[in-house]
Amino acid sequence: MTVVTRFAPSPTGFVHVGSHRTALYNYIFARQQGGRFILRIEDTDQNRYVEGAVENLLSSLSRLGVSYDAGPGKEDAFGPYFQSERLSLYRREVEKLLASGHAYRCFCSAERLEAVRNEQLEQQVPTGYDGACRGLTREESDRRARDEAFVIRLKVPREGMCAFHDIVRGDVEIAWSQIDDQVLMKSDGFPTYHLANVVDDHYMEVTHIIRGEEWLPSVPKHLYLYESFGWKAPHMAHLPLLLNPDRSKLSKRQGDVAVEDYLKKGYLPDALNNFLALMGWNPGGKNEIYTLDELIAAFDINKITKSGAVFDVQKLNWMNGQYIKTLDTAEYLREARNWLGTASVNEARLDTALLAVKTSLLTLNEIPEKLAVFIGDPAEPEPEAAEMLALDSSQTALEAYAELLADLPGLTAEGFKDVMSAVQTRTGIKGKMLWMPVRIALTGMMHGPELGYIAEYLGKEENIRRVLDRIEGRQDNRIN
RNA sequence: GGCGCGUUCGUCUAGCGGUUAGGACGCUGGCCUCUCACGUCGGUAACACGGGUUCGAGUCCCGUACGCGCUACCA
């Protein structure tokens, strides 16, 4: 039997990183098993419709390289893949349940339901439907259905235990007495998640349901539905939640949660996938860096972690930095040029500057600030830097540097090292005492990217000009 | 409140009865003939608690505590 997994989000906004992790696991498992991965849009709640949410979802998946075999825009015999386009199917199926006595019509008003609920809350007893319509005869139900609004509820067993196996949790037991007579069909004719997901998973031949832990408590309802229909239930794996640093469920209040937010900040898709895949599953061993293909090869659905995982941005940052470093020059340059923002860098030498900051980047959006050292006039030296500059040896070094440079046709990062060696040979000044004065003269600062890159970026003339500016008593005696 | 799930360094985790409890991030020290970063070599730090079972428990069982989830005509 070929494995079929599905990612079934409801289009209510942006793609949460936790949702993306779920999508990833479904995708990775299907690919690994040589199976199919499908995308189904669970748009059964008309009140939660959000403009553009589907488009956003699709683009998010595509940007992260998670492709589906069937779904929106990729229809096949098992579609359509929008639940809102499958309403007649749900109605047909729920009729079967009504006929077999596994479900019943409920005519209770929203007001009555609320009153019941308040009463239960007050009495401190478990809340849930009180079963008022559960015992209605078929005749009475049919009669009232002609002119009264109703919902259809599942008639769950009242006694005994529901035991099932979850790939992540192992054996789980829940008493049927704890399960409510869940609404399957709303009064607006739309199915609830519970009905729709069971019907669709069956007809779409889904073999493995991989979803968030929040669904674990409703498994009995789903299992009862499968049983009532006479269908075989898929295997299930309920994933641990992603958490905030304070261990509450990952939420907007404590940072970014949308995949798109991270993309906007300059995180690479591969890094994001890698990081998310390792939240809840781990191959063991020293390595933490895995491409999507490597994840597919290494993944083991039986080794998914049980406990929630705190989303640690620091580790994501590190991982993203690792991915940036492994980008080859052409790829990096192409990507980096999209992140210049308003930084006005010398177009002709842009690549030199970009390459100079490559290893120091954690995220691509740091590029403008990292490039600042290359732009405009050198900064005014801090006291410590000015002090260093004033040293006799510094002055000697700078003079030698300017003179030796003047004899050269041009300046490259490589040539810069040669000049520095020559300065050392001539003056005997070396190490920090040699490099610092030059760095300060060129940039005004004591920190920054590798000096050779900066020297190359500025060019011979500008090097000489800046150095001479820092030689005392020589301000009026420029070489240019 | 009820039910369910969970609990190994600060964080992500390895461990599947006998280990000096391993790795990664972070933090930190050294090195890399300039700084920072990179890289590299070290260091720091954990089995929630209490009972069992066993020659032996992070690993199995029970309880307690704490955390989280569910408890809708939302998913």
Image: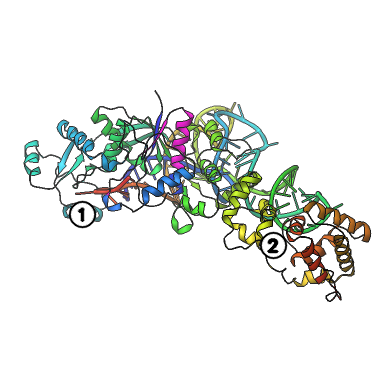
A74, A252: nearer the viewer: A74
Q: Position of residue A281 (x, y in %)?
A: 52, 38
The residue identified by callout 1 is A114
Residue at the limit of the structure toward the top, as seen here:
A1
Residue A347 percent location from the top left of the image? 65, 58
Q: Earlier in the sequence, mark 1 or mark 2?
A: 1
| Amino acid type for the residue under numbered disc 2 | Phe
Residue at position x 40%, y 42% from top? A213
Q: Residues within 10 Å of mark 1 (few under 14, many from 20)?
A: few
Instruction: State the image coordinates of residue A456 (x, y, percent, origin top left).
Output: 76, 57
* Residue A273 forms part of the magenta stretch: no
Whether residue A127 can be seen here:
no
Point out the image quarter for the N terminus of chain A: top left
Q: Is residue A389 visible?
A: yes
Q: Which residues are magenta?
A: A21-45
**Residue at disc 2, secondary structure:** helix
Point out which mark residue A77 bears: none
- Identify the element where label 1 is drawn: helix
Residue at 47%, 39% in the rendered image: A66
Q: Mark 2 = which residue?
A: A374
Residue nearer the viewer, A404 or B42: A404
Residue A39 located within the stretch drawn in magenta: yes
Mark 1: amino acid? Glu
Q: Residue at x 78, y 69 (%)?
A: A385
Q: What chain does badge 2 belong to?
A: A
Q: Quadrant of residue B5?
A: top left
